[in-house]
Structures are given as structure tokens and as C-alpha cells.
Image (cartoon, rainbow, N blue to C red):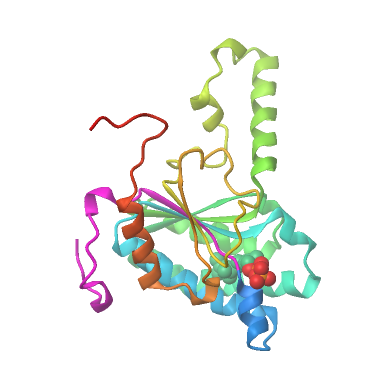
Amino acid sequence: MNFSSSSEMRIELDPQRMPQHVAIIMDGNGRWAKKRLLNRINGHEKGAEAVRTVVRTARRLNIAALTLYAFSTENWQRPKTEIAGLMALLQRFLASERQLLLDNEIRLNTIGETDRLPSGVRDTLRAVMAETAAFDKMVLTLALSYGARSEIVSMVRQIAVAAKAGTLDPDALDEKIVAGHLATRDLPDPDLLIRTSGEMRLSNFLLWQIAYAELVFTPTLWPDFGESEFIQILKDYQNRERRFGAVISP
Ligand code: FPP
């Protein structure tokens, strides 16, 4: 592995045991701002900088898939001004990170009810996704207007329709078919799920997909999350024994 960053010099990460897919619940932007008597949007802006750092680090460490919970279906209940600020920030982020994605051959992907997003954000997303569609070094998935239960309902509906039409035999239904009808059908399941800000909840994120993920909850507020903590979490992950419900013989 190319240890180009000085802060990584002493880090021993095993490139063979890197998680293929890391998912992150980025929480604590509001509290970060409140502590500094700033408004919540300032917290989200600082949070977008942490997103940049984590995307760069994940790419450099050859993590194949990174999925970020950027906006949940529940987040639509926030004040209109905060939603508008978040959407404007997302659009600025996509414009400013486009070149990074192109230079590093990162494919942009989304999950969630993106048709609920403002048209400007949808257009920018569509354009950057089209430009990066052929890249395979890493896939960056933004969960936008995403909720796992709604994703599961949509999967059940698709399967019920296929069963009714006679194109799918209910007796043949298995986990692979279910996974193939989720928004994440082209991604491996996350190996590692990180949530910042000390909350120990899953908040309707990737409920099917994280069945065997290693879970890490850190008290760090998302805007303060940086490369060194990310690398430390990856080291801790590599020291965990993943058994997938089986017994590992001595
Ligand atoms: C949770 O903090 C964070 C969000 C609801 C949005 C996440 C958005 C970003 C990290 C920035 C923009 C994203 C991209 C991809 C550019 P919170 O507001 O719930 O914090 P709190 O729990 O402290 O109030």
C-alpha cells in the first residue's frame, strides 16, 4: 500500500484485510455548531469537509465501497431553512468534488428516494453519476432521502408484483433474490458500520445489509471526524474476529 501521508507512517493496516465496504452514519453536525454558538448549517458545512477527508482516505486505502448517510427520510421533518441549506450544500459539494471523483476514478451512486430532492440537486447528481459511471476503483454511495424500511417495502412490492405476474416462484425466493431487489443490489454488504456523536442507534440505515457488519460507535461529532480516527477504527476492525455466526476452530 502507498503510505503517502505522513500521519499514516506509523499505521500498520493490513491491505489484505481491509473492509470492502464501509458505511457511515454522520451524526453530530448540529451539536458541533451549537457548542460554538454557530447555526446548524455551519455545522453541516464543517461536516462536508469531513466527508471530503473520509472519501480521500477511503480511496487511498483501497476501500472498494463507501456509503454515507447524508439525508434520511425523517430529515424532511427538519425546518425548511435547514433542509434548503443542506440541499444547497450538497449541490456545492457535488460541484467541488466532481474533479476529485474523476481524478481518482470514483463512481458516484445514490440510494433513497432521490426523486424527492430539488431538481437542481437531481440534475447535478445525474450529471456526475453519468460522468463517473464507468469507474470501478471505488463506489461512493450517498444515501439521500433514504430509509431502510421504505427500501424494504419497495423490495417486497417488486417481489409481490413478480410473483403475481408469474415471473417469480415464491418457493424459489431466497436471500439472494431479496438482496437483488434492494437499492444496494450492486454493492457488497457493509463490513463495517461507523456512527459518530455517541448515539447508539441505527436510525433506519441499511437494516438488511448490516446483518453481519462490525459496529463502531464513536463519541466524536462528525465535523471533528478525521483521517487519524478513521484509520484507528480500521485498525480496530482488523483486530476483530469475524465469525458470521460460525465457530472458528483453533
Ligand atoms: C447529522 O447531524 C447529519 C445530517 C442530518 C446530515 C449529514 C450531512 C453532512 C455531513 C454534510 C453534507 C453532506 C454531504 C455529502 C456533502 P445532525 O444535524 O443530526 O446533528 P445533531 O444530532 O447534533 O443535531
Using the rendered view, name the quadrant where residue 39 is placed. Answer: bottom right
216 or 124: nearer the eye?
216
120 or 239: nearer the eye?
239
Can residue 39 be seen in the rendering of this structure?
yes
Of all residues, the one furthest to the bottom in this rendering is 37
Residue 214 is situated, as x and y percent measured from the top left of the image, at 44, 48
Residue 236 is situated, as x and y percent measured from the top left of the image, at 35, 57
- Magenta residues (range): 1-27
Q: Residue at x 76, y 60 (%)?
A: 76
Left or right, 172 with respect to 121, comes to left
Q: Residue at x 77, y 75 (%)?
A: 81
> Would you place residue 162 above or below residue 227 in this image?
above
Can residue 88 be seen in the rendering of this structure?
no
Q: Residue at x 65, y 76 (%)?
A: 31
Q: Is residue 2 magenta?
A: yes
Residue 4 is situated, as x and y percent measured from the top left of the image, at 22, 73
User: Quick one: quadrant of the C terminus?
Assistant: top left
34 or 91: nearer the eye?
34
> Would you place residue 225 above or below residue 18 in this image?
below
Q: Residue at x 54, y 71 (%)?
A: 222
Residue 107 is situated, as x and y percent measured from the top left of the image, at 42, 55
Of all residues, the one furthest to the front in this rendering is 250
> Would you place residue 166 above or below residue 25 in this image?
above
User: Quick one: quadrant of the N terminus?
Assistant: bottom left
The mark tally for this picture is: 0
Using the rendered view, name the quadrant where residue 232 is placed. Answer: bottom left
> Ligand 1 is found in which quarter of the picture?
bottom right
Q: Is residue 77 magenta?
A: no
